[in-house]
Amino acid sequence: MECKLIGAGEAYNCGTEVIGLELDILGKELNFHIDVGKGQARLADIVPLARTICTEITNVVVENIHGDGGHIPCCEGCAACCGPYLVPLSVPEVLRLKDEISAAQEHQRQSMFRACLLSAQRILSQEPPKSLMSQTAESSKVSSAELDLVSSWYASLKLTCPFLYNNVCTIYEQRPLACREHFVKGSADACEGECSTAEVVEMPVQLPNALAQLAGELEGTSVEAVILPLALVWCEQNPERAERTWPAVMMVKRFFEIVKAMASKNSTAVVA
């Protein structure tokens, strides 16, 4: 899927239909115009677009906090939150990450695969909370309390992110949307330790959820998420899902509809 933002002073002639998206983020209007080809696209192909939208939204949120005198320590090179925190990926992100790692130089690729495999073995050797399994066995919806439960279980494994090397993120440009959206106020010191006191910034749109909803609708499945260290193992077990395609224009239009609905809902909730 050829899909590029048309920025000021730029012209792209890579597609046949321009699709627009307007978002009101904390009172600032964001406008996107995407040139999309009329061919077929895979789930992985829409991830770069989601990353671009995520960057624009988080920039507005961070600027708004700075304007109010707040401080955000999060930046490239800070690994304070890259400890035993559960990082969920939507299916499109998992498939995209696999493509990007596979395209890396051989020594980098082998190192990442090995680190992910070791983490996956550790995770799969432990039983998740039985209370969580019983509560969600008959439901595709997970409550915040259940998410807290599984996050605590994951933290108890005391894993480090398999993509962290010498305290540097080796996939920073390809990092998950959950990482891109994660900002805290105050000091990075509050992120460290099992009892984090960091004040996490709430985003007006959660792009991982938007991608997960899109994938669920297209594939006819429930909303899914994959823990980051299990991403490569999941891809090995689901190779057919990487090859399925849909009309690119339809995919982008539906994704924009989902994002716009989420933004409008959260905006209404804040006003109320």
Image: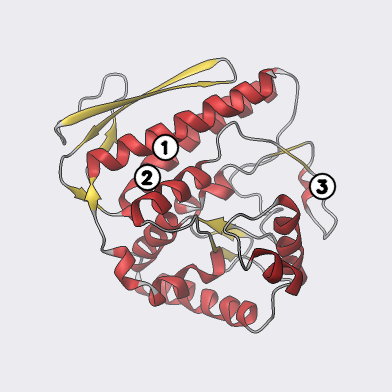
* Residue type (three-letter) at the residue carrying disc 1: Thr
Instruction: Look at 61% across and 50% down and name the residue there.
Output: 77
In the image, residue 28 sits, relative to residue 221, either above or below, namely above
Q: Which of marks 1 and 3 is nearer the N terminus?
A: 1
Quadrant housing residue 133: bottom right
- Residue marked by disc 3: 190
Instruction: Look at 61% across and 21% down and name the residue there.
Output: 268
Secondary structure under the numbered disc 3 in the rendered image: helix
Percent position of residue 23, x then y: 46, 22
- Relative to 242, 164 lies left or right: right
Percent position of residue 92, x then y: 40, 55
Alpha carbon separation for disc pair 1 and 3: 28 Å
- Residue marked by disc 2: 48
Q: Do the residues labelled 1 and 2 touch (CB within 8 Å)?
A: yes
* Residue type (three-letter) at the residue carrying disc 3: Ala
Regarding residue 163, the answer to whether it shows in the image is: no
**10 Å crowding of disc 1: few (<14), some (14-19), many (20+):** few
Quadrant housing residue 205: top right
Instruction: Look at 63% across and 77% down and name the residue there.
Output: 123
Alpha carbon separation for disc pair 1 and 2: 6 Å
Percent position of residue 228, x then y: 55, 64
- Residue marked by disc 1: 52
Secondary structure under the numbered disc 1 in the rendered image: helix
* Residue type (three-letter) at the residue carrying disc 2: Pro
Depth order, front residue of 73/92: 92
Regarding residue 255, the answer to whether it shows in the image is: yes
